[in-house]
């Protein structure tokens, strides 16, 4: 392909379906992206979607698309990738291949854009002849030294590559088990990989979500800024796709207005916020390199499990204790990731519980009877948690914010805690849960263990206060035995007016 053709000329010559009136707003976006001329009516669309007053004189270095669902952004980005791959010239060293990455939270999601790219190349014989061999499931090799590849949202796959363009699909919903902020980590790895190409282009597209993350940060900093090389385009679904069925949007608004306004009107949600700040999590981090603390005879340990059947979610266990100063320490965390045998996992957990002299575990009320039966087989009692998962998180929050929690070094645990979201639902009630497509199995177990330890620690302080005012010698002699869990509290002699609540 001969460089020099503009993207609008490519659309006119090879993809005339994009010249229809329904794609007009997208053609204005393409003109803005590549610094092409606009007429007066184009400028009206441009100003509305960018918040800017004057059109760009030069192509953008980055483009961030905050566009509602079904707005056509995947198809238009695939069209841009075809243009960049075949109608731009890149200065590559002999033997070096430039990579155009299509990234998304999952490979199947990334392949939506990738499949559009393959289809666009194959529908035009002049473009198809640039493909070397048959396209692979996740890679196209072009004769000009450019490869188009599918990648999941993982920063490790980016390093060491010469990236000439990158497309991050649905970036507001990127989640990994390795980092609480995968979008930040990936962009930090991606931008240096693109630095050697003067005309490299980063495209990030998504329907908006919460007011956090790189999409929100970029929007706040760059939307409405004239002469900014980072172009932010925000538009609702009907603007970008006038053919959308209005009934679909009306039904969505009726079902959940906050969600619908984000998904179809490209509005960042105000009803969702991060549950735990990065500073709070960092303050809870224990000693570097300490993944587990062994049993101490002076500790009274509690355990909480988040059971799973072994096919989808992890089966997790956390053990914690309260220290005399009111600090809760998480001593051990276990996660069995699927697929696994529930029976074998419980047997391993039972061994760990015995190592901490724990005879009773608390767990999720929704797990049914099978985990209780399996733990009973191992001689461990199973108590159903009265507080819900959300209630445990809300009780965990003040303990975390006051710096009274110590967590072991566990990246997946910190990632899950950092991703937790606090939502205000109808009636003004707050709930806490993992984000869409996220997980909180480890976070749930740890929250339950910390809350149990805090409640028990508070009860023991009450017990100590009672015993210190008790003159009965028998009570004083058995004080340490009770604290170590060697006797049931119901057997403890006490004055009739003493009451200890657990």
Image: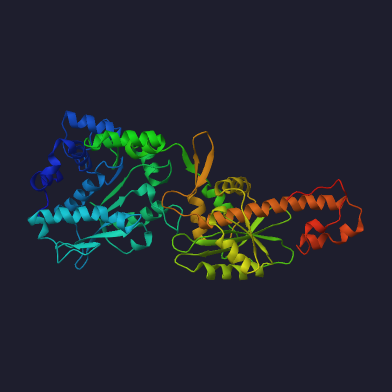
- Left or right: residue 58 compared with residue 307: left
Based on the displayed image, in which of its 4 quarters is residue 20 positioned? top left
Tell me the colour scheme of the image: rainbow
| Residue located at (9% from left, 48% from top) | 14
Residue at figure coordinates x 58%, y 67% from the top left: 349
Residue 454 appears in the figure:
yes
Can you give x and y, in whole percent of width and height, for residue 12 in the image? 10, 43
Horizontal side, residue 339 vs residue 158: left or right: right
Q: Where in the figure is residue 93, as x and y percent of width and height?
A: 21, 64
Q: In the displayed structure, would residue 304 be above or below residue 427? A: below
Image coordinates for residue 473, horizontal then vertical, percent: 91, 58
333 or 46: nearer the eye? 333
Answer yes or no: is residue 294 visible.
Answer: no
Instruction: Tell me where residue 288 appears, x and y as whole percent.
Output: 57, 63
Total number of numbered discs in the rendering: 0
- Front-most of residues 172 and 218: 172
Q: Nearer the viewer, residue 294 or 244?
A: 244
Residue 132 or residue 394, whichever sits in front: 394
As drawn, 267 above or below 420: above
Image point 53% across, 60% down: which residue? 307
């Amino acid at each position: 392909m001969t460089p020099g053709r503009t993207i609008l000329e490519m659309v006119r010559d090879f993809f005339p379906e994009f010249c229809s009136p329904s794609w007009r707003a997208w053609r204005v976006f393409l003109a803005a992206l590549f610094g092409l001329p606009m007429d007066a009516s184009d400028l009206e669309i441009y100003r509305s979607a960018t918040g800017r007053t004057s059109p760009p004189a030069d192509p953008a270095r980055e483009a961030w698309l905050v566009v509602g669902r079904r707005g056509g952004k995947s198809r238009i980005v695939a069209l841009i990738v075809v243009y960049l791959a075949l109608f731009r010239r890149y200065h590559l060293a002999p033997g070096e291949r430039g990579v155009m990455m299509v990234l998304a939270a999952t490979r199947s999601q990334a392949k939506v854009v990738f499949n559009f790219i393959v289809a666009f190349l194959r529908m035009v014989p002049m473009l198809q002849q640039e493909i070397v061999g048959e396209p692979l499931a996740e890679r196209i090799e072009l004769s000009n030294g450019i490869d188009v590849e599918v990648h999941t949202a993982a920063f490790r796959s980016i390093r060491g590559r010469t990236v000439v363009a990158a497309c991050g699909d649905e970036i507001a919903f990127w989640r990994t088990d390795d980092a609480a902020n995968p979008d930040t980590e990936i962009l930090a790895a991606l931008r240096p990989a693109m630095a050697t190409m003067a005309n490299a282009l980063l495209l990030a597209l998504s329907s908006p979500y919460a007011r956090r993350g790189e999409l929100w940060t970029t929007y706040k900093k760059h939307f409405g800024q004239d002469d900014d090389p980072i172009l932010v385009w925000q538009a609702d679904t009907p603007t970008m796709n006038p053919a959308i069925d209005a009934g679909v949007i009306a039904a969505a608004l009726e079902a959940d207005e906050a969600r619908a306004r984000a998904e179809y009107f490209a509005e960042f949600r105000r009803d969702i916020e991060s549950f735990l700040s990065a500073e709070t999590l960092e303050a809870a981090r224990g000693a570097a390199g300490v993944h587990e603390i062994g049993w101490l005879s002076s500790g009274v340990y509690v355990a909480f499990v988040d059971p799973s059947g072994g096919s989808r979610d992890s089966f997790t266990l956390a053990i914690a204790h309260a220290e005399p100063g009111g600090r809760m320490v998480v001593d051990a965390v276990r996660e069995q990731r699927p697929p696994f045998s529930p029976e074998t996992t419980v047997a391993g957990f039972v061994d760990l519980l015995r190592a901490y002299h724990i005879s009773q575990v608390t767990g999720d009320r929704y797990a049914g009877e099978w985990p209780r039966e399996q733990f009973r087989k191992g001689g461990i009692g199973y108590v159903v948690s009265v507080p819900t998962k959300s209630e445990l998180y809300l009780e965990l929050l003040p303990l975390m914010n006051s710096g009274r929690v110590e967590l072991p070094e566990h990246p997946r645990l910190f990632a899950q805690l950092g991703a937790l979201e606090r939502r205000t639902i109808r009636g003004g009630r707050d709930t806490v849960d993992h984000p869409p497509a996220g997980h909180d199995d480890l976070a749930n177990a740890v929250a339950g263990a910390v809350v149990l330890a805090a409640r028990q620690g508070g009860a023991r302080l009450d017990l100590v206060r009672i015993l210190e005012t008790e003159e009965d010698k028998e009570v004083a002699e058995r004080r340490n035995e009770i604290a170590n869990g060697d006797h049931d509290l119901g057997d403890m002699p006490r004055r009739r007016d003493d009451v200890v609540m657990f």
